[in-house]
Amino acid sequence: MKIGGEISGFNVSSRGLSIQRKKMNLIAENIANADTVEAANGKPYKRQFLQVVNKSNGFANQLNVEGANMKLNVTNKNHITTAEAFPGNSETNAASNINYNVKEDTKQGDVVFMPNHPNADENGYVELSNVNVVTEMVEMISASRSYEANLTAFNTSKQMAKDALEI
C-alpha cells in the first residue's frame, strides 16, 4: 500500500505494519489450532509462519532511496556497475521491495499413545499438532513490539510532515 507520495517514511512504516499484522494473525491462528489433531486435510494442524524476503539483491539496489533525484557518485567505474538515477515517483521503492509468503512448518508434532482416540493408527499412536504455545507467545510479543515500533515511526513521519508544513 502506497500512501505517502513523496514521503517514503509513510510507505516503509505502512508496509511494516501490514506485515506485522499478518504475522500476528498467523500466530493467533496457530495458537487457536494448537490442540487440533485433525485439520481439514485429515492430518494434524501444522504451524504456519511468515517468510519475509527482500526482492532486490544488488548493492546498487540497496542504495536506492525513494524521492532522491541524484546519481551515484563513483570513484571507479568498476565499483558500482550501474550509476543510474534513484527512483522518484516509482513503484519500486524500498517499501515495495519486500515480499512475504505464508509457509507451513514441516516438522512432525509429538506422537503420543492414545489407543482409544479416533485418529489413532494401528499401533494406538496419535500425532499431535507441531504448535508450541510458548514459542508462539514469544513470537506474538515480538511481532507486537515490531508493530508498535512501525506505528511510532509512522507517527513520527506524520509529525515531521506536519511540522514542515508549518514552517
Image: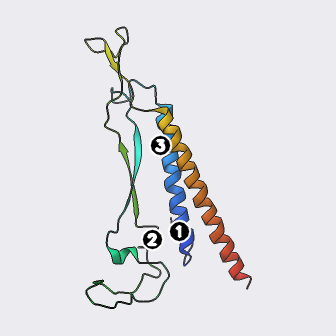
Res. 17 image quadrant:
bottom right
* Number of residues whose C-alpha sits closer than 10 Å to that of mark 2, classed few (under 14), some (14–19) or many (20 or more): many
Answer with the quarter of the image where residue 99 lies. Answer: bottom left
The residue carrying mark 1 is 11
Q: How many marks?
A: 3
Question: Tag 3's secondary structure?
Answer: helix
Identify which residue, 69 or 149, lies in the foreground.
Answer: 149
Q: Earlier in the sequence, mark 3 or mark 2?
A: 3
> Label 3 belongs to which residue?
26
Residue 3 visible in rendering: no
Rendered residue at 57%/69% (across/down):
10
Q: Are marks 2 and 1 in contact (CB under 8 Å)?
A: yes
Which amino acid, by three-letter code, is at mark 1?
Answer: Asn
- Identify the residue at horizontal 57%, vertical 60% (top origin): 150
Would you call the spot at circle 3 few (<14 residues within 10 Å), some (14-19), or many (20 or more)? some
The residue carrying mark 2 is 94
